[in-house]
Amino acid sequence: MPRAFRLSAVLVVILAVQALPAWAQLEGKPFEQGMRAPDALLDGSAHDRHTQIAAFGNYSWYLGVGAGLRYSLPILKDGFIPELNDSVEVEAGGNFLLGLFGGGPSVIIAALEPKWTFHFTPQLDAYAKLGIGFFIWLGQTNFTPVNVMAWAGVAYKFSPNFWVRLEGGVLGAALGAGLDF
C-alpha cells in the first residue's frame, strides 16, 4: 500500500506540472510567459512568505487514524535556487495516532521538519519535508522513540489565506487545511 500511494503522489505532481501549459494557454499566454508570471515557478524575484498553521487528519499505514497540527515558519523566503520561486520553511507540531490496526499502540509524535517548497503558480505549491519525530508510545515501551520522517505534498490556495494540503510519507497520508497569517 505505501508504494502505491507514493507512486500516486508522484503522478499527481507530474500531472500538475503538465497542466501548467494548459493553464497559460487558457489565459491566452504562451507557456513560457505563464511560467514567468508573478509568483509562478520561474519568477526569481524576491517574495514575501507568511507563517502558517495547519490542521490535519492522518491515516497511518501501520497504526490507524489520528490528527495533527503544524506551525510553519519561513526561514529562507527565496529558497536555494535564485532562478526559481522556491522557499524553505521549518514546520513544528505534533500528531496523535490511535492504534487501531492489529491492536497496535497509540502514539503521540512531536515533529520538527524542514520543508522545501516550489511555488508552481500563485495557487499551487509542491513540497518535500525531511524531519525528525519524537514518539511517545502509549502502552508499549519497546518501540523506537526517535524516528526520521519524510513527506511529499501539494498545497492548493483557495483564498488569500486558506490552503488545502495533501501529504504522503513514511507514516501514511494526511489531508489538512492551512491558514496564513
Image: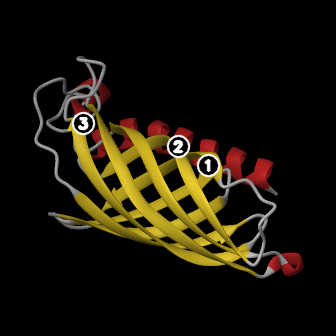
> Tag 2, which secondary structure?
helix
- Mark 1 and mark 2: Cα distance apart in space: 6 Å
Q: Earlier in the sequence, mark 2 or mark 3?
A: 2
Which disc, if any, is residue 91?
A: none
* Residue 108 in the image: above or below residue 142: below
Residue placed at 44% from the left, 49% from the top? 112
Residue wearing tag 1: 9
> Tag 1, which secondary structure?
helix
Name the one closer to the observer, 92 or 158: 92
Count how many numbered circles sit on residues in the image: 3
Could you tell me which quadrant the C terminus lies in?
Answer: bottom left
- Mark 2 and mark 3: Cα distance apart in space: 15 Å
Residue placed at 16% from the left, 45% from the top? 49
Residue 99 lies in quadrant: bottom right
Left or right: 133 in relation to 86 = right
Amino acid type shown at disc 2: Val
Amino acid type shown at disc 3: Ala
Name the one closer to the observer, 105 or 56: 105
Residue 60, given in percent of the width and then of the height, sits at 69, 67
Residue wearing tag 3: 40
Residue 7 in sight from this viewpoint: yes
> Tag 3, which secondary structure?
loop
Name the one closer to the observer, 116 or 96: 96
Amino acid type shown at disc 1: Ala
Residue 76, given in percent of the width and then of the height, sits at 23, 32
Which disc, if any, is residue 13?
A: 2
Left or right: 180 in relation to 106 = left
State if disc 2 and disc 1 touch (CB < 8 Å): yes
Residue 130, given in percent of the width and then of the height, sits at 52, 40
